[in-house]
Amino acid sequence: MITLSPTLARRLFIAQQRLAGPRPRPTADSLLSVTRDIGCLQLDPISAVARSHLLVLFSRVGAYDPALLDKLLFGDRALFEYWAHCASIVLTEDYPLFSPLMRRPDWSDHTRAWVKQNEKLKRYILNAIRKRGPLLSRDLEEDGIHPEAWVSTGWTSGRNISRMLDHLWIGGKIMVAGRDGIQKKWDLSERVLPDWTPRHTLSERERERQSVLRSLRALGVGTPRHINYHFTRGSYPTLKRTLDELEAERKIQRVEIRDDGETWPGAWYMISDAVPALERLSNGDWLPRATLLSPFDNLICDRNRTELMFDFFFRIEIYVPKAKRQWGYYVLPILHGDRLIGRVDPEMDRQRGVLTVNAVHAEPRAPAVGGDVRGAIESLAAFLGASEINYNKRRVPSVWKRSF
């Protein structure tokens, strides 16, 4: 069994996440390659700095033209939007991993009953999209249909058309064909997917096996809980059996992580084809970077894993009242080499072209690398097209103050 130090485990994770080594040129091929390696780009509507999926790619390739991503999504159709970690951008070449989930969506009894009760609304939406699509949700009216109202404790309560669109999307009937700002343009899936889309059908066993391998490859090393939380989150119903099979076939192998003589608890795995990368890291082939991470970045989306591997407690404070926030509204962790050394609280004013840095926070025992931290902020500003950066210098830690 391979034994890793926590540092080596972190470095493998970071390397597999494309956050170490030379940055690739910011081309469409690079964006596609990064998405392939990390599995998916989680979508989130908040744009206090930039949309999360844009930041995830920026952290890996540096400043790039977001129009390249739009072309991959809505021109080349090499990517499409579906449910992975959460709502995400995924690879069209991975369609066989998602189509079984579309055929058997993991709906609650409440959702299934509501969809069945509203067959008339469902038919109306599909017919309207077929005749007039792509359509925005506001192009659809429920007048004269009188659907059973969608009732929930969330913001979607009563939003019948929006909820039915979501259910048709999860069920694979419709897809996002484009966007008007952040509003989705819906069309029939067969009109969105390109002709070259792989459409072979995988058994549930094979879908799970391939998805486990994709999840573990992106993690570097992980426990069953980590694997289950990654890539097609929560869609591994026979995970223990699958891990046992893949281990017997030597596609994955057990590892242990030892820290000062103590072994980290649980069963840890790595994908066997990552062994050469691990050997290179063991031999000192490590080129660290300093960059800022989206709060939804694949490296830190599993908060418990982040705390274990990086000793870094991170929670989003978007919904915390301003007076009670510890760090800020939309805080970006600072990755420096193989450590998360602090956080930045930025806000982008697009009309004025100004990036305001409300605060910079250093973790305890953070290294004196203020120049690298400032450089990471300046790289973000360049990506956002900011002509000016305003720092609140009263909220810069003493260890980095000289650089600000």
Image: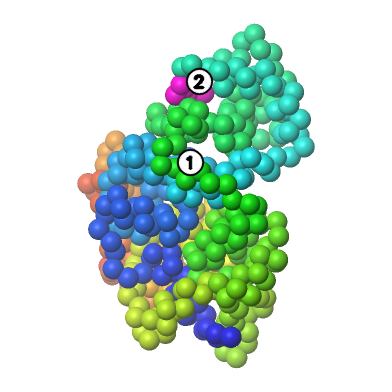
Looking at the rendered structure, which numbered label has been put on residue 81?
A: 1
Mark 2, Cα crowd under 10 Å, few <14 / some 14-19 / many 20+, is some
Residue 287, image x, y percentages: 32, 75
Q: Is residue 127 left or right of residue 235?
A: left
Q: Quadrant of the C terminus?
A: bottom left
Rendered view: 145 above or below 73: above
Secondary element at image label 1? strand
Q: Is residue 272 left or right of residue 114?
A: left
The residue type indicated by label 1 comes to Glu
Q: CA distance from mark 2 to mark 1?
A: 19 Å
User: Nearer the viewer's eye, disc 2 or disc 1?
Assistant: 2
> Is any part of residue 302 visible from this angle?
no
Residue 123, image x, y percentages: 62, 19
Q: Which residues are magenta?
A: 133-139
Locate residue 222: give its quadrant. bottom right
Which residue matches tag 2? 130
What residue is shown at x 35% (from left), y 59% (from top)? 60
What residue is shown at x 48% (from left), y 56% (from top)? 39
Q: Quadrant of the N terminus?
A: bottom right
Q: Nearer the viewer, residue 191 or 295?
A: 191
Q: Residue furthest front?
A: 200
Labels in figure, total: 2
Colour approach in the figure:
rainbow
